[in-house]
């Protein structure tokens, strides 16, 4: 998305430096790191489904709101696409890993690898979707400016945030439907008459 976002700002004469775009990714990654322990702590109290609902709404909401903030300028976009979107993703990430390995105690490495690998494979799916939507005719950059100058292409950039936000929300809600906490029974006292449930720890 970075080249399209940058060219959108340049096309509409909004002052932005080329290297400013890197802040979108940097801030998002920073917010992910900040949100992961928070989501992990709440997972132990609320369970995986509550955490994933909150995470999905924040994450998809941040992307969807970027449809509006892109038109306002770089700082508003940084708030929605960097801060809000990044926080929403990180909020559910550690909890999802913890809940998944609780079901497969003997295959923790494989499960973590699949989840992390799935995250890394995201661009393989979403980059072509973005390109097909924004630039279906494979229009080349201008030879002189080295930027996209086609008006129709540029004006499709904001609405791609609605598309991606909607697709992600559907995927997240589907995953939410399939998620369950694995509860293990623990003897409450030596008499064995009382039972209680506890969530598996986030980190073992």
Image: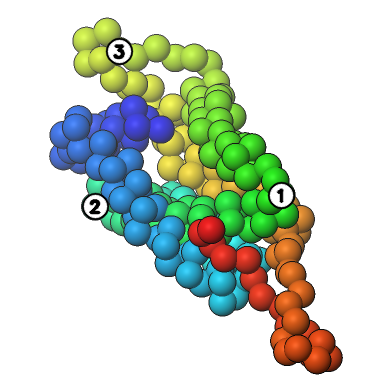
Residue extending farthest to the front is 190
Labels 1 & 3 near each other (Cβ < 8 A): no
Q: How many marks?
A: 3
Residue at 25% x, 47% y: name it.
74
Q: Which mark is residue 199?
A: none
Labels 2 & 1 near each other (Cβ < 8 A): no
Residue closest to the eye, 134 or 44: 44
Asked which quadrant contains residue 143, the reply is top left
Cα distance between the residues tagged 2 and 1: 43 Å
> Percent x, y for residue 197?
72, 78
> Percent x, y for residue 198?
66, 75
- Secondary-structure class at tag 2: helix
Q: Which residue is mark 3?
A: 142
Asked which quadrant contains residue 43, the reply is bottom right
Residue extending farthest to the right is 193
Mark 1 neighbour class, 10 Å CA radius: few under 14, some 14 to 19, many 20 or more = few
Q: Which quarter of the rendered picture does the N terminus lie within?
A: top left
Of the image marks 1 and 3, the number of the one nearer the N terminus: 1
Of the image marks 3 and 2, the number of the one nearer the N terminus: 2
Residue at 31% x, 51% y: name it.
30
Q: Is residue 15 left or right of residue 183?
A: left
Q: Which residue is mark 1?
A: 104
> Percent x, y for residue 10?
24, 32
- Visible in this render: residue 39? yes
Residue at 71% x, 49% y: name it.
104
Q: Is residue 48 above or below residue 94?
A: below
Mark 2 neighbour class, 10 Å CA radius: few under 14, some 14 to 19, many 20 or more = few
Q: Is residue 84 left or right of residue 106?
A: left
- Secondary-structure class at tag 1: loop
Q: Which residue is mark 2?
A: 75
């Amino acid at each position: 998305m970075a080249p399209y976002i940058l060219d959108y700002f340049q096309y509409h004469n909004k002052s932005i430096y080329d290297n400013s775009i890197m802040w979108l990714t940097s801030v998002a990654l920073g917010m992910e790191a900040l949100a992961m322990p928070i989501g992990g702590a709440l997972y132990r109290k609320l369970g995986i489904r509550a955490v994933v609902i909150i995470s999905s709404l924040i994450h998809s909401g941040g992307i969807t709101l970027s449809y509006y903030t892109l038109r306002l300028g770089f700082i508003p976009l940084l708030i929605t696409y960097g801060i809000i979107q990044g926080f929403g993703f990180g909020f559910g990430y550690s909890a999802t890993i913890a809940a998944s390995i609780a079901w497969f105690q003997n295959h923790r490495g494989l499960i973590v690898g699949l989840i992390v690998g799935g995250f890394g494979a995201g661009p393989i799916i979403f980059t072509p979707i973005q390109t097909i939507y924004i630039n279906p005719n494979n229009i080349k950059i201008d030879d002189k400016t080295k930027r996209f100058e086609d008006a129709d292409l540029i004006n499709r950039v904001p609405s791609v945030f609605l598309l991606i936000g909607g697709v992600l929300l559907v995927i997240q809600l589907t995953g939410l439907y399939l998620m369950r906490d694995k509860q293990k029974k623990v003897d409450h006292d030596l008499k064995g008459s009382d039972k209680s449930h506890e969530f598996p720890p986030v980190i073992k």
